[in-house]
Image (spheres, grey):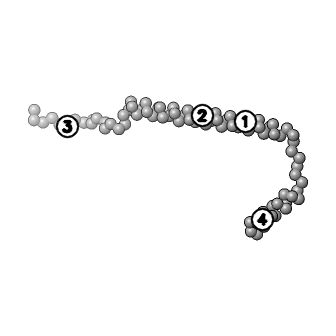
Amino acid sequence: MNLPEREAAVRRMLEQVPQPPVPSDLYGEVVRRGGRMQRRRTVARRLLWLALFIAAVAFVVWATTARPWVEPPSETTPPLTGW
């Protein structure tokens, strides 16, 4: 069965089955839930950006105090000869 035949079969099935009635208060419920989901996503996105900012600040503070790019001082001293 190729694509046009499948589309035609699906259209025939959809036309044969009577569509169930949609409740009248469904739209308001969908809008309310959608608004709530959007607010939650906005809050989650802002919290993630805040966590990223705090992590970046913590890294910069650590890097300036620890200075990991500087070679550590040698723990042994060369022998003193020729005094």
- Calculate the distance from the C-alpha at mark 3 to the C-alpha at mark 4: 85 Å
Whether tag 1 and tag 4 are in contact, CB under 8 A, the answer is no
Asked which secondary structure carries label 3, the reply is: loop
- Give the alpha-carbon distance from disc 1 to disc 4, as whole Å: 37 Å
Of residues 13 and 73, the one nearer the viewer is 13
Q: Which mark is residue 35?
A: 1
Which residue corresponds to mark 2? 46
Residue name at image x 27 percent, y 36 percent: 74
Few, some or many residues within 10 Å of mark 3 (<14, 14–19, 20+)? few
Residue under circle 3?
A: 78
Compare residues 6 and 80 and report the one nearer the observer: 6
| Amino acid tagged 2 | Arg
- In the displayed image of the protein, which residue is found farthest to the left? 82
Q: CA distance from mark 4 to mark 2?
A: 45 Å
Q: Which image quarter is the C terminus in?
A: top left
Amino acid type at circle 4 is Arg
Q: Which residue is mark 4?
A: 6
Across and down, in percent, residue 49 comes to 56, 35
Query: Marks 1/3: CA distance?
Result: 71 Å
Q: Nearer the viewer, mark 2 or mark 3?
A: 2
Q: Is residue 58 left or right of residue 27?
A: left
